[in-house]
Image: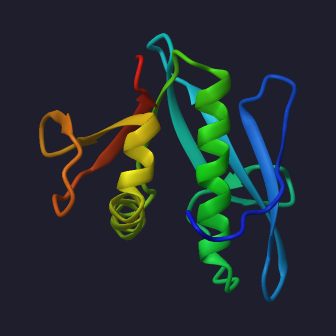
Amino acid sequence: MNHPSYEFSNNEKSVLFTFDSVGSRIIPKGVLFQQTGTPNLFNVIMGDVDSSGNIDVYSESNNGDMENVLSTVIQIITHFLATNKDAIICIQGSTPARTRLYRILLCRELNTISKHFRLLGFGETELELFEPGKTYRAFVISSKNV
């Protein structure tokens, strides 16, 4: 992605990453890689970090820096997969509009993503190789060697 990204930090277990969105306000953001019941499979939870430290996946901050935030999330996912070689991550928007936004971003960055990662889409009933222009309910990203 050709947009600037924010510096991020992560917790001791390297599953929670945080950074500040700097637009019309400063808004703490979080990206959590939540282990599922399947070994090496993680759900990605993204959103604003509220005052109690929870990630609000429904917040719409409209802070004027969406491209920088998305670029930072891509950097975090890249870092996570580089340090967790066997990890498989699943991304699903908290709303259909967010899932659509993620699909648009993945389409736009497909050439770069495809060089390093395997990208799949979950359609109506099955997982398939990601195809631009198709509608998916969720996305699965892993290193090419997984």
Q: Is residue 22 left or right of residue 144?
A: right
> Who is closer to the viewer here, 145 or 6?
145
Locate residue 55, reporting x and y percent.
70, 52
Locate residue 56, reporting x and y percent.
65, 58
Say which quadrant the N terminus sits in. bottom right
The answer to whether residue 46 of the structure is visible from this angle is no
Residue at 58% x, 58% y is 57
**Picture quadrant of residue 50:** bottom right
**Picture quadrant of residue 90:** top left
Coloration mode:
rainbow
Locate residue 64, reporting x and y percent.
67, 86
Looking at the image, how many numbered discs can be counted on the residues?
Answer: 0
Relative to residue 71, is residue 127 depicted above or below? above
Relative to residue 121, is residue 80 depicted above or below? above
Q: Is residue 107 left or right of residue 146?
A: left
Residue closest to the far top: 39
Locate residue 146, reporting x and y percent.
41, 16
Residue at 68% x, 23% y is 83
> Who is closer to the viewer here, 44 or 131?
131
Residue at 44% x, 13% y is 38
The answer to whether residue 70 of the structure is visible from this angle is yes
Residue at 17% x, 45% y is 123
